[in-house]
Image: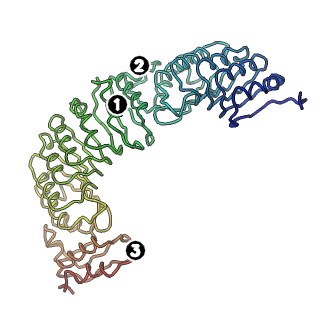
Amino acid sequence: EGPYNFPLKSLDLGNNQFGTRELTTILPFLKSWEALNSLSVEGNCINNRGAQLLAEVLDTVRIRRLSLNRNQISKEGLSCILSSQNARYLTSLMISDNEDIGSAEIDEIARFLSRATTSLKLLEVGSHRQCFRIVWFEKLCQSLQNNTTMSKMSIVGSLHGPIEIFISNEQRKNMEKYMADLMKSFGITCCCENGSKIDDIINSATKIKFPHALHLNLDKCREIGLVLSRCKMLQELCLNGNRGCLGEEMLVALFLAEGPYNFPLKSLDLGNNQFGTRELTTILPFLKSWEALNSLSVEGNCINNRGAQLLAEVLDTVRIRRLSLNRNQISKEGLSCILSSQNARYLTSLMISDNEDIGSAEIDEIARFLSRATTSLKLLEVGSHRQCFRIVWFEKLCQSLQNNTTMSKMSIVGSLHGPIEIFISNEQRKNMEKYMADLMKSFGITCCCENGSKIDDIINSATKIKFPHALHLNLDKCREIGLVLSRCKMLQELCLNGNRGCLGEEMLVALFLAEGPYNFP
């Protein structure tokens, strides 16, 4: 029915699945509105030929906001848009998720940003299908050095997700600090703000730590590997929490493709990445190569006893102080390899909770390690949420600590009423009788007098068993309480109030009859 007679300023034709042919149809319509300043054709099927048609519109109309996200435009089409007559009037340009981006497209955008005539304030670039490389970001930042208009850059597909970068005139004055702050968006923290070039910042980076759960793929792993190859002062690397398995090929891309690396790494966190012994074998040379490494976390993976043997090989060559193996598949054999390794005596923190179901064999292994005169261990985390941590195991660990002078904290998972943390001081060692009585309160057991340093003495003289929190009793815990009750001689008060769930017949039998009749008043 056109031509229409109204001063249209904004037109949104996004997400309509039309292509170049349809765009050709409405070209006269688009060119007819001199007042049009906002045009969105995002989420369609527009290719490079369609981009040429849009460039013709830009030759006649001064559009300020142009959204081309999610189309099929590559470098040729982008070049037509950015070289059009009125491109210099664009204040917002959204071109993310088109054809896979590359150096050619980034060069084209960088040239446009570096022009003195550009009015661009907002740029959205990148692709969810691929990793936005640091070197591309570097080119864009370099092109902004003399740009006075740009205030926001939105990057899709950065290492840990979309990021928005705001640029103020104040930040331009202090470009060195600003560039360091920008790199934090990519998870990279440097030790000092000593350069306005990203290369300087990566060279001096001391920490690479991603703030969110990762969605790593092979493309992103290759990019991180390239970044690592440029580091000179890196001390801490955290890649914890990939959503999906960090497979063999991805680990090779991270640690071996660009190696050997040349930085004094002290802390490595590869927790919660669902990799197993096969993948651990791949990066074994990498782990052995860092003499300065003192903290290693591989918790929340699928490492079995063979994997524990490989980690013991690492401990034979590197003096690791903090080792986290929580939530894997390690049993007594693997634990024995770890604790008998050459440098195990230098461990100050060992976290081994929630592996294969724990038993007396595992506790004996730990107790022998704790009783060694050479051990440096200060923190131990042990137990399993899947089973009850038995009093007799706790008893063995405490006995092994009698002559231990280093241990300061023991964290027990799966005790009768939940996880407990036990702090051990030198003062408490001097007064072990009172301390053991206090410890038993963590298990809900109160004795009438502090008359022994052995748990058996305390249970014999216990007058009260009362749990301080609502219980999560199961058959396993009921059997353990039944065993404790069978050792009591002076018990007067028993409180098992507030179980979350039915205290069924089999559980009541385990509590009161399996070990009875009991001998206390």
Which quadrant is the C terminus positioned in? bottom left
Q: Indicate the position of residue 42 as horizontal and vertical percent values.
A: 67, 32
Q: Indicate the position of residue 229 as horizontal and vertical percent values.
A: 34, 23
Q: Which badge, 2 or 3, comes first in the chain's sequence?
A: 2
Query: For the residue labelled by badge 1, is the local secondary structure a helix, a strand or a loop?
Result: helix
Q: Indicate the position of residue 301 as horizontal and vertical percent values.
A: 31, 46
Vertical relation: 378 (above or below) 194: below
Q: Is residue 115 left or right of residue 391?
A: right
Q: Distance between the residues labelled 2 and 3?
A: 60 Å
Q: Do the residues labelled 2 and 3 touch (CB within 8 Å)?
A: no
Q: Nearer the viewer, residue 208 or 21?
A: 21
Quarter residue 428 falls in = bottom left
Q: Residue at 8% of width from left, 49% of height from top?
A: 373
Q: In this view, does 254 lie to the left or right of 170?
A: left
Of labels 1 and 2, the one closer to you: 1
* Residue at which label 3 appears: 501
The amino acid at mark 2 is Asp
* Residue at which label 1 appears: 254
Q: Distance between the residues labelled 1 and 3?
A: 47 Å
Query: For the residue labelled by badge 3, is the local secondary structure a helix, a strand or a loop?
Result: loop
Q: Which residue lies furthest to the left in this view?
A: 373
